[in-house]
Amino acid sequence: MDDPVEKKASSDAALDRVLWALRRAEMAMQALKEQRLRPLGLAPAHYSLMLSVRVDPGLTGAELARRLGVTPQAVASLVGKLEKRGHLRRRAHPRHRHIQELYLTESGVEELAAADAEIASLEHQVVQTLGATDARQLKKLLHHVADAMQATSAAAESGGTTRQPASHGDCTQS
């Protein structure tokens, strides 16, 4: 493909893919989350970590790393910052003293509530932009895509075939 016209057509096609549209939306939302959380002294990664700990108290750093799709070192850095601010506390696992479980402190719960209010305002903006019906449809479609991609990944890791993803409702209906 040395022809410049063919190269341009190929890159134009890449920009017309669903995956590119997903990436653009994710980048735009990430930028807005950073903008909204910055005055609170938080980054989106802090919010995601704190939310995960609130939903599932006692998670370990390794569990958080897997859940958030980051390295254990990245989690350790985030945890250290949140712990210094008094938002997280570590507690030794009851049976495995070398494993530390993570819990939100009262200040962490309050900080997460403030951050979540900012994120909820972004959610409201998306729903207002799309309308309630289209927002519900988009959410169903995104769940469908996530399930399908997770199934593909799991199949590739196990060397098997792709399993049917879990259903989140009929994604062809509004």
Image (tube, grey):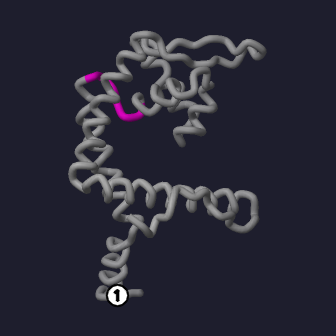
Quadrant where the C terminus sits is bottom left
* Residue 73 appears left or right of 115: right
Q: Residue 141: name its quadrant.
A: bottom left
* Residue 81 appears left or right of 144: left
Image x and y of residue 146, in percent: 52, 56
Q: Nearer the viewer, residue 166 or 109?
A: 166
Q: Residue at x 29, y 38 (%)?
A: 33
Secondary structure at badge 1 equals helix
Quadrant where the N terminus sits is bottom left
Magenta span contains residue 152: no
Image x and y of residue 55, in percent: 52, 28
Magenta span contains residue 43: yes
Q: Residue at x 54, y 17 (%)?
A: 103
Which residue lies under the disc numbered 1?
6
Image x and y of residue 128, in percent: 22, 49
- How many residues crowd around disc 1 within 10 Å: few (fewer than 14), some, or many (20 or more)? few
Q: Residue at x 32, y 59 (%)?
A: 134
Query: Relative to 133, does residue 12 appear above or below in the rendering?
Result: below
* Residue 148 appears left or right of 160: left
Total numbered badges shown on the rendered structure: 1
Query: Relative to 14, does residue 109 appear above or below in the rendering?
Result: above
Point out the stretch of residues depicted in magenta.
Answer: 40-45
Query: Relative to 119, does residue 146 appear above or below in the rendering?
Result: below
Q: Residue at x 75, y 65 (%)?
A: 160
Image x and y of residue 85, in percent: 39, 12
Amino acid type of the residue tagged 1 in the rendering: Glu
Q: Nearer the viewer, residue 21 or 164?
A: 164
